Image (cartoon, coloured by chain):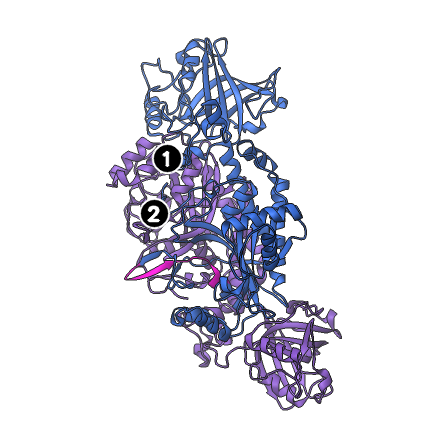
Chain colours: A purple, B blue
């Protein structure tokens, strides 16, 4: 029994083998099902059918069905007649029965429509013809199964369907198949089965994001943000909102996107740093912000995006900038612990497609000086100068050496050469070759860059001149420190990198919902 | 006793009446004070002085001072010798004594340097000469006072200073005075005392943000974000991060900022709506995001910004879009309750400068239909058509009428005329003149606009054509709904407006740390 099967917007099958007009029940308050055999559709019936065509659900008052979540379908529910709303994940008709897998986010359950007392032959045929990825409401009896259903998250039960409604019909041809998207790396190649390349996935992100892997990645990412903020809020930090449209490029103008701003031009902020520092000068003491950061770098690498999410921290310290490092590393440790303790399901889910070693960290966090790092690299055969910056391969090598020696995937490299850091970095008072600055690494890749900032207008002016920066362009930045500025420091963490490296993934586009790079602006 | 008084970077006064070389104590590990009378400065002393000149604090290991917070200075601490780091809020020398008010964020305390056993005449003179807004460390004895100090937050104690160090010296001339910035509206005019206009404040935001009023506003704003997210996380929502650089202007191209994107052009997102909806189509079920929203509107009003923070919600619903309204109104109610219960100090502080009636709300939230609102306005003498949009004055008037009749500052206006809403708004299935859309109001001003969205590609196409929108430009938007889309709805809340209206302020620039409007891009 269904209404306008062609439109397939809202279709009901009756539980009897043969269709009967009496089953068409449409009342002012409630549309339950409409019979396709009803020749004399009443006013209400016609009106309802019209809404279905328009895709409008018509429930002036709510039906009293309680929808059960797929993850709640456990043996305790055996024998119960329940309603579920889910997607058709797979569908396989076999003689007088049709096996469906119904999916809801990371969870799925097997369901069966079989010709018999509960369903007609037409109903089985109808169910078998619903396109994959369509959303359906089913009324079904929960049954315990003898043998575990290994392919589903709900392994101990299946659903015996009595009624099935299509809430939203998917088009018959999908641009990519979900099962191809979750196939573990390499497996497709071996078996000759399809895998989906990254661009196809990203072009069809709305489907790619439905995979168990994507669902797990972005739920974990949501968790990283929450852990970051909760930890800092507990430490007395204040959340701030900083502008993204700015009038001048504070770091000298390279790699910055230009915006048309009414009759003038503006830029997109490469970091909230100036504003974080102004908040410190404005007595907020400890601040954080979570927001987009824009880099107009033409870098097509596995770890660069032109727009990413920065988890930014800035704080005044009392006596030593290591107070800042401790505050940041402790925040990272709280994030790692929170993920380990609360997101084990997600970590395991991602691991099925992308296996990796569990992420290791120490308490307290390992802090090495830059010169120690250089010494370790030299011992491993690398030739480099004391004041030379780390290349990406050397960063990775050092990550491996540190892992071997200290058994940690997270560490801080402190006291970078002054020459390789931005002008606002505080020089090391003990050795002018170095600076009070640091990077933090996960699995050998940089996730944070930070420093004690110069809080003295005069010294800042000197350092800017040393870097040949136009003082006029950074005047308001320098002026911020003229009316009393506490010593302070901070850093910015790349959210997508943290998620990528924590999960042992290999491309930052996997941890950005809608990544932006020099070649990608859509979807 | 001080080092290089001219540089004033780090200055120590000894506790004795007369200066004595022995008090100059600089050791490798710790710089405590340097005597200006020491003629033979040692190597260390010279080095220390050099760091002071550079503004670098030099503490290779931390001194064992525990700094006490100003708000912790209560009678229980009477008699204790403590260290405090704070700003010089005011300074008044009177004969052999100098009264200081030391300020730390919203808190302040009176402090006294007096010639006697503990301080020399020079020390009093030195203290009196420290510029306002400079940051100092003081060592002082906490004393109970006989008479409450009405002008300070810590009314029952004062500090008797024994040592004072300047951590960061402010320039002698401040561009604006803090006391002028916190003067209640109107008071300045009556007494002929100075008030500070908004542009001067915003031009010098780093100082303006130090006022008790600003500190309270932005701490409350941080609280709004936290309450918003915590409420939604508890309801099972997932936080998402949506891109701000987009390839096409989804709502037709008006009021959108253009960005140069390598060799092409892009736009700044006017709302995260498309991406929220894609997440719903990608099975995230209930999502929220907090982030910047860009509007290239040349509106110079009290409530428009070109960049503001959107608190965005989108969720799939089961049977009726009122489930969405309930989810949003409940979130707002949780925010109002959280502010009332946890931010009373901040509310009171802002109220001292900007008095207003406490914010009133009902549970459950009042929901009126648009037609009811129009009827109320007509009864009050307004002439308007059924399908005419509300003008700003009529919105405000309706807010007053609703307050009179229902005693609430927060309500929902539901079922807007279809004609005044965007093309993606779901029409009302019962009456094609109206739509399943709503606005929410605080003190008569709109803070949220939302709707059930059309989740059917065919109906969406029809509606876009009706609005003369170029289908090619919104192809990817429409395609998002082709592979099964649950019925859903949502809305976007303006953070700055919520804060402004909750606190009864009159300009949205007061609740934006660094506001952007057609005429302001700095700081």
Q: Is residue B252 visible?
A: yes
Q: Which residue is mark 1?
A: A480
Dot 2 crowding, Cα within 10 Å, few <14, some 14–19, many 20+: many
Instruction: Determine contact: label 2, label 1, CB under 8 Å.
Output: no
Q: Earlier in the sequence, mark 2 or mark 1?
A: 2
**Are discs 2 and 1 both within one chain?**
yes
Q: Is residue B482 visible?
A: no
The chain containing the residue under callout 2 comes to A
Q: Quadrant of residue B109?
A: top right
Rendered-image quadrant of the N terminus of chain A:
bottom right
In the rendered image, the vertical position of residue B109 relative to residue A210, given as above or below: above
Residue shown at the point (35%, 15%) measured from the top left: B36
* Image position, residue B14 (x, y; %): 44, 15
Residue shown at the point (52%, 46%) measured from the top left: A363
Residue A155 falls inside the magenta stretch? no
Asked if residue B195 lies left or right of residue B386, the reply is: left
Q: Quadrant of residue A460?
A: top left
Q: Which residue is mark 2?
A: A374
- Gap between marks 2 and 1, in whole Å? 36 Å
Q: Which mark is residue B208?
A: none
The chain containing the residue under callout 1 comes to A
Residue farthest toward the left in the current orientation of the protein: A468
Viewer-nearest residue: B31 or A117: A117
Dot 1 crowding, Cα within 10 Å, few <14, some 14–19, many 20+: many
Residue shown at the point (25%, 37%) measured from the top left: A465
* Image position, residue B39 (x, y; %): 32, 14
Viewer-nearest residue: A513 or A409: A513
Query: Magenta segment range?
Result: B261-276
> Which-is-in-front pick, marks 2 and 1?
1
Callout 2 secondary element: helix
Viewer-nearest residue: A145 or A83: A83
């Amino acid at each position: 029994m269904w209404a306008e099967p062609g439109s397939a917007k809202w279709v009901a099958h009756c539980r009897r083998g043969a269709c009967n007009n009496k089953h068409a029940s449409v009342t002012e308050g409630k549309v339950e099902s409409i019979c396709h055999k009803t020749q004399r559709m009443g006013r209400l019936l016609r009106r309802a059918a019209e809404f279905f065509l328009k895709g409008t659900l018509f429930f002036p008052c709510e039906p009293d069905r309680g929808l059960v979540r797929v993850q709640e379908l456990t043996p305790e529910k055996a024998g119960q007649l329940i309603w579920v709303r889910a997607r058709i994940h797979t569908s396989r008709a076999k003689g007088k029965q049709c096996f469906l897998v119904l999916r809801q986010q990371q969870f799925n359950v097997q369901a069966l429509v079989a010709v018999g007392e509960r369903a007609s032959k037409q109903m089985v045929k109808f169910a078998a013809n619903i396109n994959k990825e369509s959303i359906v409401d089913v009324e079904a009896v929960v049954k315990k199964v003898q043998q575990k259903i290994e392919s589903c998250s709900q392994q101990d039960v299946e659903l015996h369907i009595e009624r099935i409604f299509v809430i939203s019909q998917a088009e018959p041809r999908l641009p990519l198949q979900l099962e191809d998207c979750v196939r573990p790396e390499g497996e497709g190649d071996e078996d000759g089965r399809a895998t989906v390349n990254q661009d196809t996935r990203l072009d069809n992100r709305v489907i790619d994001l439905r995979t168990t892997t994507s669902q797990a990645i972005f739920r974990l990412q949501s968790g990283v943000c929450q852990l970051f903020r909760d930890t800092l809020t507990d430490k007395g930090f204040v959340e701030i909102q900083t502008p993204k449209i700015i009038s001048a490029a504070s770091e000298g103008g390279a790699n910055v996107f230009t915006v048309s701003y009414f009759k003038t031009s503006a830029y997109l902020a490469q970091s909230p740093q100036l504003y974080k520092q102004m908040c410190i000068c404005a007595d907020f003491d400890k601040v954080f912000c979570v927001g987009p950061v824009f880099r107009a770098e033409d870098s097509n690498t596995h770890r660069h995006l032109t727009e990413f999410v920065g988890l930014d921290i800035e704080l005044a310290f009392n006596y030593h900038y290591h107070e800042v490092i401790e505050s940041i590393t402790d925040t990272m440790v709280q994030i790692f612990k929170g993920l380990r303790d609360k997101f084990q399901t997600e970590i395991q889910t991602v691991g099925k497609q992308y296996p990796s070693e569990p992420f290791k960290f120490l308490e307290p966090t390992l802090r090495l000086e830059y010169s120690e790092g250089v010494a370790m690299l030299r011992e491993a055969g690398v030739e480099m100068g004391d004041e030379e910056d780390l290349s990406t391969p050397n960063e990775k090598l050092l990550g491996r050496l540190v892992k071997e020696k200290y058994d940690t995937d997270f560490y801080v490299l402190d006291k970078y050469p002054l020459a390789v850091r931005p002008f606002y970095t505080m020089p090391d008072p003990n050795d002018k070759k170095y600076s009070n600055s640091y990077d933090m690494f996960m699995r050998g890749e940089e996730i944070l860059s930070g420093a004690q900032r110069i809080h003295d207008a005069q010294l800042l002016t000197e350092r800017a001149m040393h870097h040949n920066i136009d003082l006029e362009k950074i005047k308001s930045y320098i002026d911020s420190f003229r009316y009393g500025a506490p010593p302070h420091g901070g850093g910015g963490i790349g959210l997508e990198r943290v998620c990528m490296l924590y999960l042992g993934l290999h491309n930052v586009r996997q941890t950005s919902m809608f990544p932006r790079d020099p070649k990608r602006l859509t979807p």
